[in-house]
Amino acid sequence: MAQPLLKVRNLKTHFISRNRTVRAVDGVDFDVFEGKVLGIVGESGSGKSMTSLSLMRLVPGPEGRIVEGEVLLNGRDLVQLNERQMTDVRGNEMGMIFQEPMSALNPVLKIGEQIGEVLVRHRKMSKRDSRAKAVELLRSVGFPRAEQIINEYPHQLSGGMRQRAMIAMAMACEPKLLIADEPTTALDVTIQAQVLDLMRDLKTNRKTAIILITHDLGVVAEMADDVAVMYGGQVVESGTADMIFENPVHPYTHALMESIPTIHESRDRLATIPGTVPSAANFPPGCRFADRCSLAQSQCHEKMPELREVEPGHMIRCDVVAL
């Protein structure tokens, strides 16, 4: 059996201040394989984006820190690296598409300079060679006038163009792993399709492993090979995309699936999940979904369920669901 490119084990990222501890990521486990897409889904506040920042060691400090766990990239634990070593990994072995490209791109540097900086830093290219490579990269992500785009600033580009420029930057050094945090948010459907086609091409032709973080279950169904469902800073269900979409077992996953509109049936109202995700600063005892779960029993409010296997490769964090 193929070994995972990335193994995440018991990852915990907390924000610690004098008065409280916010457990943003609280014991997350998953694997990512070469040439495969892992979709991480869940509501806002479930810990998806903070997981991605933890993998890149970009957790905002000084309060935020990884307090426990391993992030093994080809067997090398990124948690143990110092900042200089981690700088060599970012952009080189791991690339990231941030959720909002307008805030992630430097507003006072031209697009070509920002892409070229990655190549100069990691590939030791001259400025002339890095400029030529930047043009090539922009063409590869669908820019018809790449020679002009490299001389423009982020504010001169549309949202979709900025997103594609960020993908070009993330892929400049052909990293083994690409993390895409909500890459299609706020894009119109045409540009969204272009971005997804580009990511599909990276997966198929370059064997790039991709972590796709999104709340859009339609995108996950289209793109992902494997899925991890997060809630309250934890993975509550994981498995192949077929397992999750055809046989959702955890009550939270099942509720998410029920909220998706379908053309096959007519409903007056879409199903909703009552309540909200609990605050990471004040998680309730026991199962974190218990207060919103229609199947909850008394034990659910007292004991935190462990991940258990319901079929080979299909894990859930629930002790009471009937299989």
Image (tube, rainbow, N blue to C red):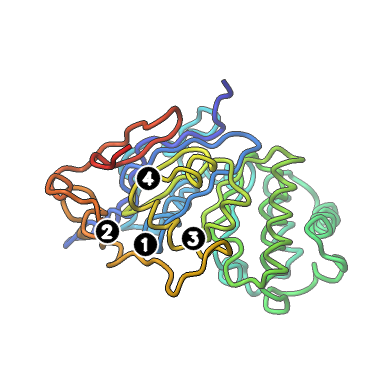
- Residue 88 appearing in the image: no
Q: Nearer the viewer, residue 4 or 95?
A: 4
Sequence-first disc among 3 and 1 = 1
Q: For the residues labelled 4 and 3, say whether their Cβ atoms are less than 8 Å apart.
A: no
Closer to the chain start, of discs 4 and 1, is 1
Amino acid beneath label 2: Ala
Q: Is residue 43 above or below residue 204?
A: below
Residue wearing tag 4? 235
Please identify, in this view, whether the residue under mark 2 or under mark 3 is nearer the observer.
3
- Circle number at residue 114: none
| Residue 296 visible, this orientation | yes
Q: Callout 1, which amino acid?
A: Gly
Crowdedness near tag 4: few (<14), some (14–19) or many (≥20) residues, C-alpha within 10 Å: many
**Side of 309 relative to 302 (left or right):** right
Q: Residue furthest bottom?
A: 156
Residue under circle 1? 45
